[in-house]
């Protein structure tokens, strides 16, 4: 009986987790696949289902791996300055105490670089399962790096009395407005310095932070308090959230910022997948397409038990 309740709990918990941010991450990985060159696209088309499903696993690992959380953000406001000696691969930051200090503020640029190296290795080894895993994770971290609120210690508006702005920006608005976006992004570009690219991305996100907060505050001034929030149905539950009216006004006030960040995420993801394939010596992708059934089976059974991922390297 106990086991039955545990199973019900895991299923419920799993479904709840799956819906958090799932939609946007899935869309980003899906559209990144569309812009790949002909040599790569058959593989990414064939495993589109797995790559989209796995796009959210990095968030699910947060609940089983205490080290995972810091890989999704960086609190740039808590860094006095970002000097060049910091912009080196994680393993070269040899002072242990420095690494420990950095972990407290989040390490997403290094995580993008590390995941990229894993993807290059996976392409070199022509290992389909690892390519799918690391490409999916890379898309996830890259998408997170494009969210301004992933670059600040005020990530949920808790310091400015704007509680809930994180889910508003990352989940509620994309779910409302992505269907109206044109997500065609054109060809991916080769990137030779991935760590630099990751830092440029978080800096660009951070530069938008003032607007994200100010426009939310401004919209709140323009809409009567009782109309700012309303009950909406989410995951079959009635929940108090930002009202549709507030979301429309805020989205309008941002003048396309959300669409531009999502498109930039798609382009950056495709560019890193493409660059990793180039760096691995452009392996013939039609040699990698065997073993779909095994991968389908593997990812389902490993969804809740992945602890760390050093062994995937
Ligand atoms: Zn994340």
Image (spheres, grey):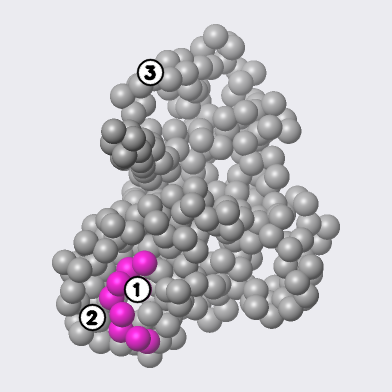
| Position in image of residue 182 (x %, y %) | 34, 48
Q: Image height check: is 247 above or below 110?
A: above
Q: Nearer the viewer, residue 178 or 161?
A: 161
**The quadrant where residue 72 appears:** bottom right
Q: Nearer the viewer, residue 29 or 22?
A: 22
- Residue 238 disc label: 3
Disc 1: which residue: 131
* Quarter placement of the N terminus: top left
Q: How many marks?
A: 3
- Residue 265 disc label: none
Query: What residue is rendered at 27% in x and 56% in y?
Result: 300
Residue 54, magenta (yes or no): no
The answer to whether mark 2 and mark 1 are in CB contact below 8 A is yes
Q: Which residues are magenta?
A: 124-133
- Residue 288 disc label: 2
**What distance separates the C-alpha of mark 1 from that of mark 3?**
39 Å
Q: Is mark 2 within 8 Å of ligand 1?
A: no
| Position in image of residue 233 (x %, y %) | 35, 21
Label 3: how many residues lie within 10 Å, few (<14), some (14-19) or many (20+)? Answer: few
């Amino acid at each position: 009986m106990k086991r039955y309740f545990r199973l019900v709990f895991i299923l419920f918990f799993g479904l709840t987790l799956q819906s958090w941010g799932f939609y946007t991450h899935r869309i980003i990985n899906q559209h990144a696949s569309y812009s790949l060159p002909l040599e790569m696209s058959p593989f990414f088309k064939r495993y589109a289902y797995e790559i989209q499903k796995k796009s959210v696993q990095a968030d699910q690992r947060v609940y089983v791996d205490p080290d995972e959380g810091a890989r999704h953000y960086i609190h740039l406001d808590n860094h006095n300055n970002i000097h060049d000696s910091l912009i080196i691969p994680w393993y070269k930051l040899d002072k242990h105490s420095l690494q420990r200090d950095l972990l407290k503020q989040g390490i997403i640029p290094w995580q993008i670089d590390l995941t990229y190296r894993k993807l290059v290795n996976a392409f070199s080894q022509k290992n389909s399962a690892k390519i799918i895993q690391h490409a999916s994770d890379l898309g996830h971290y890259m998408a997170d790096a494009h969210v301004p609120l992933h670059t600040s210690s005020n990530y949920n508006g808790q310091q400015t009395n704007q509680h809930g702005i994180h889910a508003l920006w990352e989940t509620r608005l994309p779910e409302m407005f992505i269907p109206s976006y044109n997500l065609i992004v054109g060809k991916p570009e080769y990137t030779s310095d991935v760590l630099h690219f990751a830092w440029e991305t978080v800096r660009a996100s951070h530069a938008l932070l003032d607007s994200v907060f100010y426009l939310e505050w401004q919209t709140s001034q323009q809409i009567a308090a009782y109309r700012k929030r309303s009950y909406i149905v989410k995951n079959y539950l009635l929940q108090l959230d930002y009202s549709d009216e507030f979301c429309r006004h805020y989205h309008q006030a941002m003048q396309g910022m959300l669409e531009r960040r999502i498109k930039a995420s798609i382009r950056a993801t495709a560019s890193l997948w493409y660059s990793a394939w180039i760096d691995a010596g452009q392996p013939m992708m039609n040699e990698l397409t065997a073993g779909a059934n095994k991968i389908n089976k593997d990812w389902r059974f490993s969804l809740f038990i992945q602890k760390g991922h050093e062994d995937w390297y």
